Amino acid sequence: MGDPTSRRGSQRPGQPQGSWEQAEEYGEEYGEDEQDLMGGPAYQAGMPMYPAYPGEDAGMGGLDYPGMDMGYAPEYQPLAYQGAEFASGLPMSPGLYQPMESPYQEPGVGLLTQYNLYPDDDQELEESPQHGPYLRDDPTLGPSEPAFMSFTRDVPEPEPRELAVQNAKAYLLQTSASCDLSLYEHLVNLLTKILNERPEDPLSILESLNRTAQWEWFHPKLDTLRDDPELQPTYEMAEKQKALFLRTSTGGEGEQEMEEEVGETPVPNIMETAFYFEQAGVGLSADESFRIYLALKQLVEQQPIHTCRFWGKILGLSCSYLVAEVEFREGEEEGEEEEIEEMLEGEALEGHEEEGEEDEEKEVDTVPKPQWKPPPTVPKEESRTGANKYLYFVCSEPGRAWTRLPHVTPAQIVQARRIKKFFTGHLDAPVTSFPPFPGNEANYLRAQIARISAATHISPLGFYQFGEEEGDEEEEGGAGRDSFEENPDFEGIPVLELVDSMANWVHHTQHILPQGRCTWVNPLQKTDEEEELGEEEEKADEAMEEVEQEVGPPLLTPLSEDAEVMHMSPWTTRISCSLCPQYSVAVVRSNLWPGAYAYASGKKFENLYIGWGHKYSPENFNPALPAPIQQEYPSGPEIMEMSDPTVEEEQALKAAQEQALAAAEEEEEDEEEEEEEDLED
């Protein structure tokens, strides 16, 4: 026989249908003998006690009596439930159920299964712990008399494969104390991101997607709209450099511009210079060199430039500086800098006038002024002369805006020689050092450029010559000639001769004196305004010692006359390739400023600097010590503190003062008497 529960949905043919009211009447009629039946042997053996009756309709299904298929005698066959009449005429004798004890021994069928009058599709009632028509709180039963035994549904054990899957998922859902995100959730987010974005090659960018998905989890978006993807620095830089490769005009105008560009242009041939320096083993890559060429071309289009040259690259901590050395056309002066200087001077004059008015108002409380005077400031060199002969523009990357550096002052050059700082890559960054530097990083960068140019810019002997207008005599300042011109008759020097002798190379940039200028000036020399000073100030100026004039090496001085550094030559020469010297170039490297190089091949030469902007020092750099502390006051009896006098000394002093006063009065009286006698005579 099968499970009776599987046959609940089927109804035997000819079996009448009942109702819920009939079931209640049936339960009330046999409720008195329920306890006796539950304690009988049929109940303990798990056999049915009541005849089955049909459900309310075919959908609910009727309950078939299990003994109908066992071949019982007709008088013991179960009768179908016919309603209230059948319930009232049914004999309630225990002997009715005696024949069912021995032949029916089917285990596994409980009372709940046989007397479940609820439909199968009613899940809520089927899963409820209280089943059947008899509830625990039925008023016909006592409070301590249970209607049914407790029912527990057996849960089948999962299969090994399903159990392994559940354990694996539980392991992936684990979280740590420092992170609320589990590996399972992270993988779900990563796969969702890949399916939403659908990149072309997700495997190659899997690590980037992994970091992005994790970052998005811990940095949730504040709005519901999807944010724009962040621009990578390389992509942003590529967008800026894209403008360098585009031509704004087309058609006939473009052809005219191309013809003009083919002609004379102040933009140098950066690619040719990069090729020669590549032979020497220094320089930048071809891609970066071409971008620098386009950036210099853009600078020439924006500024009135007469000559332009790529000076080099100074490295920084966050970003580097590309330096362009330019010279404006004649008549095109830098008006912006002059306006700034005039504004600063005007503010200084206003400040002095306000201080003078305040001093006049506070004449009562006059503060003693110190007699010490600061040393006179050395004026900076004018534009197009000395250290300010050229203008310098810098930018961090090709395609970014060019920034013009200010002119350098002698004080900045003097202080730059005493300190050593790394460049940060930001022109407005302060320079924190001792001695204090007068300016920010832009001024410090300009001072280092001036120092490097004066020491490392060299050329083959005979490439430059002095003009015919200049005489052989030195100027009053002692610096000699400050200008030169190219020699049209220069034929070049063989490469082997350039490498063998340093006398074939000369400096074509003026030397910077210890004063911070290329041409010396007397700081004590008075101007027209200073001549109006008083006599006291003139005497004080005369007492000061005279300053000796500083003299440096003149222009076009050979490198062989340079001073050695700790018994080491300041220059190193070599040939680019010893296997084919006839096609090689001569390379010169500076040992005083590491990163400065020069090459020469025939009539061509060029200088380049790529470094940190620091001068070589044989010893470790040590900051300058502070100045010695001045004495507070000179020691002498005039300022020494005396001991207090005693009472006797005070009385003696008082008596002496009284005697002196009396003597003075007597002398006055005698003088008056003599005058009166003279008048009488």
Image (cartoon, rainbow, N blue to C red):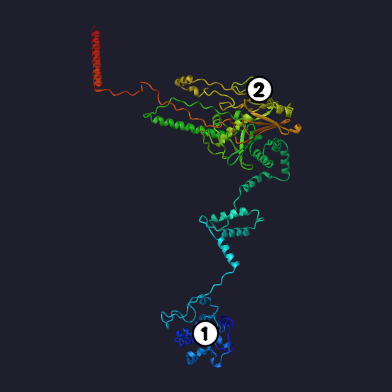
State the quadrant of the C terminus: top left
How far apart are the alpha carbons under marks 2 and 1? 137 Å
Residue 248 place in picture, x, y as percent = 68, 45
| Residue 410 occupies quadrant | top right
Q: Residue furthest front?
A: 102
Q: Amino acid at mark 2?
A: Glu
Image height of 112 relative to 439, above or below: below
Q: Tell me if 597 is positioned left or right of 374 in this view.
A: right
The picture places residue 153, in percent across and down from the top left corner, at: 52, 75
Residue type, numbered disc 1: Pro
Which one is nearer the viewer's eye here, 671 or 217?
217
Q: Please rate how many residues cluster around mark 2, counting C-alpha atoms within 10 Å: few if below 14, some from 14 to 19, many from 20.
A: few
The residue tagged 2 is 470
The tag earlier along the polypeptide, 2 or 1, is 1
Q: Quadrant of residue 462?
A: top right
Is residue 475 something one can see in this rendering? yes
Determine whether the residue tagged by mark 2 lies in a helix, strand or loop: loop
Which part of the image, by quadrant, shows the N terminus?
bottom right
Residue 48: give its label: 1
- Vertical position of residue 541 compared to residue 191: above or below: above
Front position in the image: 472 or 651 = 651
Q: In screen coordinates, is 506 left or right of 620?
A: right
Q: Who is closer to the viewer here, 82 or 614?
A: 82
Q: Position of residue 597 (x, y in %)?
A: 66, 33
